[in-house]
Image (cartoon, grey):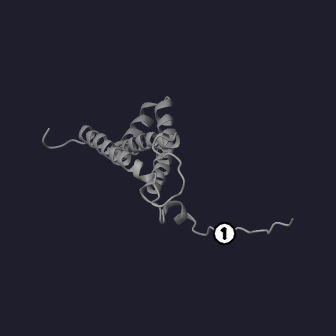
Amino acid sequence: MKFPTTTAQTRPNNLGFRGWAYAGRYGIERYLYTLQRITGLGVLLYLPMHIYVTGHKLDEASWNWIMGLISRLGPYGEFMVFAGAVFHGLNGIRLLFTELGYLLTKPSRPVYPFTNAALRQRPVIYVMFLLVAAIVAYGAYELFPFAYR
């Protein structure tokens, strides 16, 4: 018995960087995944610089030069690293629960009306956003000098 051969109908992936950052018809989960990648790269690039500066025994002139450069940049760079690390950590916990299956629906037959796993994830996403906003706001309060203190 001969079986008919089928070829997969595929389109070439010629989106480039746009395909990495553009979520297309996907929802907020895809954008959170892209932000997870970006914040992970930011923290990864910051870590070697931090280890180099704090780990080397620099003479006083070199140390003062590096600290002067950092102080000219202001606390904004530190705040960006802090905000990125907070988002990366809390979104990573959300992704961990999703990968372990706690935020997915139980498998069922595809009968209309279809169930969507995103409906279980959305409340957790909103709670994660609130936690990130609260922690980053507290970090901004502690890091930046405000007039009412």
**At label 1, which amino acid type do we have?**
Thr
Residue 133 visible (yes or no): yes
Outermost residue, right side: 1
The residue beneath circle 1 is 10
The quadrant in which residue 71 appears is top left
Q: What element carries label 1?
A: loop
Q: In this view, does 59 lie above or below 35?
A: above
In the depicted view, which residue is nearer to us: 68 or 40? 40
In the depicted view, which residue is nearer to us: 113 or 45? 113
Q: Is residue 111 above or below residue 140?
A: below
Position of the N terminus by quadrant? bottom right
Q: Label 1 neighbourhood size at 10 Å, few (<14), some (14-19), many (20+)?
A: few
With 16 as the anchor, is 103 left or right in this view? Answer: left
Residue 58 visible (yes or no): no
Q: Which residue is drawn at 50% across and 34% down?
A: 51
With 148 as the anchor, is 110 left or right in this view? Answer: right
Q: Residue at x 52, y 65 (%)?
A: 18
In the depicted view, which residue is nearer to us: 107 or 45? 107
The x and y percentages for residue 20 are: 53, 60
In the depicted view, which residue is nearer to us: 19 or 9? 9
The x and y percentages for residue 78 are: 36, 42
The quadrant in which residue 15 appears is bottom right
Q: In this view, does 83 lie above or below 52?
A: below
The x and y percentages for residue 48 are: 52, 39
Q: Residue at x 51, y 43 (%)?
A: 44
The x and y percentages for residue 47 are: 49, 39
Outermost residue, left side: 148
Outermost residue, top side: 57
Position of the C terminus by quadrant? top left
Q: Residue at x 47, y 49 (%)?
A: 36
